[in-house]
Image (cartoon, rainbow, N blue to C red):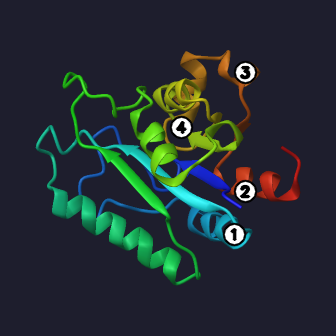
Amino acid sequence: MNRWIILDRDGVINADSDAYIKSLDEWRPLPGAIDAMARLYHAGYRLAVITNQSGLARGLFQRSDLDAMHRRLAELLTARGARIDALYFCPHGPDDGCDCRKPAPGMFLRLAAKHGVDLGRTWALGDAYRDIQAAEAAGARPALVRTGKGERTLAAHPDLAERFPVFASLAEFTDRFLEGTL
């Protein structure tokens, strides 16, 4: 069975910052997020992370810094017997005109093409409006978390709560999802 969950990174898995997450020292998992990912994995779901990382284009950090953050995430999951099955990041800035930077659906479409993901049956969690827009444009099932920029996103776009499920955190989504209440 090819069952996937797509996660944004900053604000969903780890703490976010308006000043960007630029180093391994700044990368801090949100409470319960790593355990939630492991629970999804052990329930038979493959995990994909799809994240904008324009700090690369802005010169705020290097690819080696990003790789170190992703290695730490992988180590934390490995310690729980889990893993990320696909990780896509957009290194471009907002004016670069790429098709991968959310809200564009490019990374979602690449995931679907490479791994045969049925996006119409796949939840995609994010904390920013552009995460929801990208998931919706790709035909995935968007959901918003209140962590990271989630509260700010809801304040700016209150209709999202009427159109898509909203969860306190990745941990709450995982609880409800695995209970079968979604």
Q: Secondary structure at mark 2?
A: helix
Q: Quadrant of residue 66?
A: bottom left
The amino acid marked with disc number 3 is: Arg
Q: Residue at x 50, y 42 (%)?
A: 148
Could you classify mark 1 by the number of other residues whose Cα lies within 10 Å: few (under 14), some (14-19), or many (20 or more)? some
Q: Label 3, label 4: how many angstroms apart (C-alpha)?
A: 15 Å
- In the image shown, does 145 or 82 lie closer to the viewer? 82
Q: Which residue is mark 3?
A: 163
- The x, y position of residue 119, in whole percent, is 62, 39
Proximity of marks 3 and 1: CB atoms separated by less than 8 Å: no
Q: Label 3, label 2: how many angstroms apart (C-alpha)?
A: 19 Å
Q: Which residue is mark 4?
A: 127
Proximity of marks 1 and 4: CB atoms separated by less than 8 Å: no
Q: Residue at x 54, y 17 (%)?
A: 156
Please identify the quadrant where the C terminus is shown.
Answer: top right
- The x, y position of residue 176, in whole percent, is 81, 52
